[in-house]
Image (cartoon, helix red, strand yellow):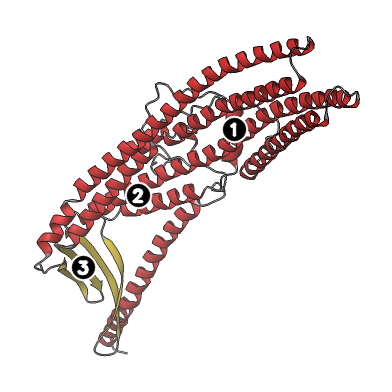
Amino acid sequence: MPKDRLLRSGAESRLSARPTAALGLAVLLLAGCMGAGGSGVGGVGGSGAGPASRMNLAPTDAAGQPAQGGSALISQLQARQSVLVPGSGYARVADAVLAADAGTAAAELRIARLRSEARAKNWLPKLGPAVTLTSLNGLVAGLVLEQALFDHGKRKAERAYAAADVEVAAVTLSTEINQRLFEGLSHYVKAERARAQGAVSARAADRLAGFADVMRQRVEGGLSDRSEQQVIAQKLIEMDATRAADREAEVSAMAELAAMAAGPLDGVRGIDRLALSGRADEPLSVVKARGEGARSIAESRIARAGLMPSLTASADVNSDGIDPGVRLGGAGLLGWGTREELAALDATADVVARREAEAAETAQRRIVALEREIAQLASQQAKGAEVLAQTEANLELFVEQYRLGRRTLLELVAQYDSYARLERDQVALGHEIALRELEIARDRGLLVDGARM
């Protein structure tokens, strides 16, 4: 074969091989990108992301260190300190309930962070394969490289939207964990209230049973009639029913708590007073409203940029070389209602500010109402203690007068029944105060340390 023919044959073979090489290069690039992304997702959802696991709310860099210029909202959530005393009954219940959490909100936060990390790179050029069919029924493979030159801040708004979405997911996580702990602790307080009231009912029932025996002996001895015996028997039946209801309430509350907890809590006893005075932590509902507002503003900016024209530079690399170009995208054409649409989108910031102010007012009113209820219950508890002490003194006087024959057994039984019911009500007041305190701590996000989420 002549030398020039060999050269032409080699050149033709190299030209025919260029599409295949370009297509292969594109496939390799895509495989590399997909492999890197897949490993990142797998790392987040690996063995350390079980139902009871927690994640760090603060953004981190590639080395796992806290990122510079992180979210102030997330930093505020992390800085919150729980009002539960370590080692107390409340803390033990909270730990057991938190350990059994399914972690749905934490999984949603991981997804939001992955989306934010993806959006953080949207300013980089995009690279992808391009395969076209020529007029000669041949395939031309190449690579397309695109870079946005001017987009009216759309990509910046997309990054802001993704970052705000992470903040909303973080507040949702904190809200759901505090709500879960509140429910568990509420069941615990209700069980303690039923247990304390049941102890009062049991003592009263035993005392009334003793009175019933005395009355039975008096009836048998002819000193009293059966109508008096029936009155005391009715009091005893009512107190036994009250004791059974208290026991049922205790069992029901403990069963609901056991369904939420990771371990048995039968040995935990007592309620705690929460140190809420002086705590001015912003309610979680207000923090969430602020995060949702930032997300709404970013969404409006994305929509506004979509109404405006954009400019994108592209380069098509194929067997024929590099074919550069510039493309005009976006809306391009402006309609008669575009001005009003832009004005509506620009008003989003005002709506967001009003929503945040409304959320702050609602949360503050709720907390003030709970604080007033606590003050009223505390005042009622103090006055009730005085009344209970006076009733107890009267009861002792009735007992003394009964022994001297100045009071009948029915009068003594009625006095003791009133005293027992006042004691049950007095016991309940302390637990009602505890429930109100838990509500305030939940609204302020103070039932769990931010560092534990």
Give the quadrant of residue 129: bottom left
Residue 228 as seen in the image, left or right of residue 124: right
- Indicate which disc residue 315 carries: 3
Q: Residues within 10 Å of mark 3 (few under 14, many from 20)?
A: some
Amino acid carrying label 1: it is: Val
Q: Nearer the viewer, mark 1 or mark 3?
A: 1
> Considering only order in the chain, which callout, 2 or 3, is on the residue closer to the N terminus?
2
Q: Residue at x 60, y 35 (%)?
A: 190
Amino acid carrying label 3: it is: Ala
The reply to whether residue 71 is in sight is: no
Q: Position of residue 87 (x, y in %)?
A: 60, 25
SS for dot 2: helix
Q: Residue at x 30, y 36 (%)?
A: 361
Whether pointer 3 and pointer 2 mark residues with C-beta atoms closer than 8 Å, the reply is no
Residue 105 as seen in the image, left or right of residue 214: left
Residue reaching furthest to the right:
221
> Considering only order in the chain, which callout, 3 or 1, is on the residue closer to the N terminus?
1
The residue under label 1 is: 189
13 lies above or below 382: below
Spatial CA span between label 3 and label 2: 34 Å
Spatial CA span between label 1 and label 3: 68 Å
Q: Nearer the viewer, mark 2 or mark 1?
A: 1
Q: Nearer the viewer, residue 76 or 2?
A: 76
SS for dot 3: strand
Q: Residue at x 18, y 64 (%)?
A: 312
The residue under label 2 is: 165
Q: Nearer the viewer, mark 3 or mark 2?
A: 2
